[in-house]
Image (spheres, rainbow, N blue to C red):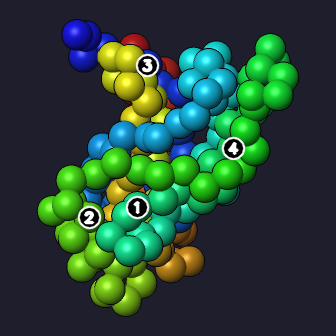
Amino acid sequence: MSDETRLIAKNKRAQHEYFIEDTFEAGLVLKGTEVKSLRSGHCSIKQAFVRIKKDEVFIYGMHINPYEKGNIFNRDPLRVRKLMLHKREIMKLKAGIEEKGKTIVPLEVYFKGSYAKVKIALAKGKKLHDKRSDKKEKDVKRDMQRAMKNKQ
């Protein structure tokens, strides 16, 4: 079995909107042609979010395009999908979201070997001034890189 990972989708907005505190790797429960569509890279997690219901973790708003050759076997692209985590990880997430201002966000979808995985994170929302300071830091780093490049 190979531990080779292949990235399918990444949520770049999550880094901008949240302070990432703890990350978890969750298995993704897929049905039928969703796997083939995911393998071809047709997935989006920009609008996705994660909820816990009755000690089970689900991802909402994850869009997997219907497989072109799937005809009647295609599922609803925005259906709710179950995530597989260990019980202690679920309890840790549950305790984390009980704190004010914390949520669970999906960061990326990838294949690890032949298994579809989702990297989710316990995150705290950023305020506007936090976003501004992050942008300022990013701009300063970019300017320093340019200066170093021009100096050489």
Q: Is residue 92 above or below residue 83?
A: below
Which residue is at a point 42% across and 84% down the rendered structure image? 101
Q: Amino acid at mark 4?
A: His
Badge 4: residue crowd in 10 Å (few <14, some 14–19, many ≥20): some
Q: Residue extending furthest front?
A: 72
Asked if marks 1 and 3 touch (Cβ < 8 Å), the reply is no
The residue tagged 1 is 57
The quadrant in which residue 27 appears is top left
- Looking at the picture, does residue 99 appear above or below residue 90? below
Alpha carbon distance from label 1 to label 2: 7 Å
Secondary structure of the residue carrying numbered label 3: strand
**Splitting the image into 4 quarters, where does residue 67 fall?**
top right
Three-letter amino acid code of the residue under disc 3: Arg
Residue at the limit of the structure toward the left, as seen here: 88
Q: Amino acid at mark 2?
A: Ile
On the image, numbered disc 3 is attached to which residue? 6
- Residue 10 circle label: none
Q: Mark 3 or 2 closer to N-term?
A: 3
